[in-house]
């Protein structure tokens, strides 16, 4: 056998050996991070919750630049009153008004976006809210009320009728968008671990990935504090473990 033929045969044998001995490489795409638009929802929510209006002013402008419509930005701020109170929500809305006025003065025409569709269901609001909550959690609510809902039936009704019917029923934002806003707000507030863990589970159920929720924590670390983000990361680990069961 000529040397060149011998070398070619040896090389072929080596390649065959490597193809058998080495595990096949996968080419799956890495998890998609949050889009620029979603990132601004997270940051806007965190800064609204903490009342950092100068940074919120900048974040709202970035959100509009990233594709948030005026109505979507407004919807985020309206929803947040249910989680961080009217004072923070109203301050956020007033900041949005100033941002829009300044952008208009610079010749920027922002897209208003769609408004919420009319509610055509004739079902009682409590039942609609209950159904929406079950869609978010993926779990039917059955049996007797327990915990705080049993102790305070009023809060159970307010949550179902107002938060999960009046607010979450509005289709200006998707459920994943609403969960991004809620989770970021709760991380930023701190001290609300049971609610945060519940909403992390809801976020996973409506399609947010572990990588995207880790991205939320990184954004909140930059906007709020490492301590708040680390507490959120610890609860995310628990939510992911629960989802596997």
Image (cartoon, grey):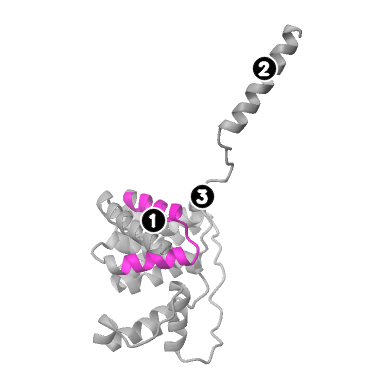
Q: What label does residue 43 carry, if any?
A: 1
Q: Which residue is drawn at 47% across and 85% down?
A: 128
Q: Position of residue 210 (x, y in %)?
A: 43, 55
Decide whether residue 192 is among the magenta residues: no
Residue 90: percent from left, percent from top: 34, 70
Disc on the earlier residue, 3 or 1: 3
Q: Mark 2 points at which residue?
A: 10
Q: In this view, does 65 lie above or below 77?
A: above
Q: Residues within 10 Å of mark 1 (few under 14, many from 20)?
A: many
Residue 244 visible to the viewer: yes
User: Looking at the image, is mark 2 or mark 1 earlier in the sequence?
Assistant: 2
> Disc 2 vs disc 1: which is toward the camera?
2
Residue tagged 3? 31
Which of the 4 image quarters holds residue 147? bottom left
Q: Which of marks 3 and 2 is nearer the N terminus?
A: 2
The image position of residue 169, as x and y in percent, is 48, 78
């Amino acid at each position: 056998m000529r040397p060149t033929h011998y070398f070619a045969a040896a090389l072929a044998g080596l390649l065959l050996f490597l193809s058998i001995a080495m595990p096949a490489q996968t080419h799956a795409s890495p998890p998609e991070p949050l889009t620029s638009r979603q990132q601004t929802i997270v940051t806007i929510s965190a800064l609204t919750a903490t009342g950092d209006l100068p940074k919120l002013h900048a974040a709202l402008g970035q959100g509009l630049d990233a594709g948030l419509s005026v109505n979507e930005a407004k919807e985020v701020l309206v929803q947040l009153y249910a989680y961080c109170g009217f004072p923070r929500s109203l301050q956020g809305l007033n900041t949005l008004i100033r941002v829009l006025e300044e952008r208009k003065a610079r010749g920027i025409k922002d897209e208003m976006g769609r408004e919420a569709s009319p509610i055509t269901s004739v079902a009682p609001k409590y039942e609609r809210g209950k159904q929406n909550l079950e869609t978010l959690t993926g779990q039917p609510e059955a049996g007797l009320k327990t915990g705080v809902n049993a102790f305070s039936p009023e809060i159970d009704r307010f949550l179902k009728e107002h938060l999960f019917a009046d607010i979450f029923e509005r289709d200006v934002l998707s459920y994943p968008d609403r969960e991004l806003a809620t989770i970021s707000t709760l991380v930023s507030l701190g001290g609300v671990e049971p609610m945060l863990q519940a909403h992390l589970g809801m976020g996973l159920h409506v399609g947010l990935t572990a990588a995207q929720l880790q991205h939320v924590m990184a954004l909140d670390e930059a906007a709020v504090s490492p301590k708040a983000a680390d507490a959120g990361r610890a609860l995310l680990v628990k939510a992911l473990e629960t989802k596997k069961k």
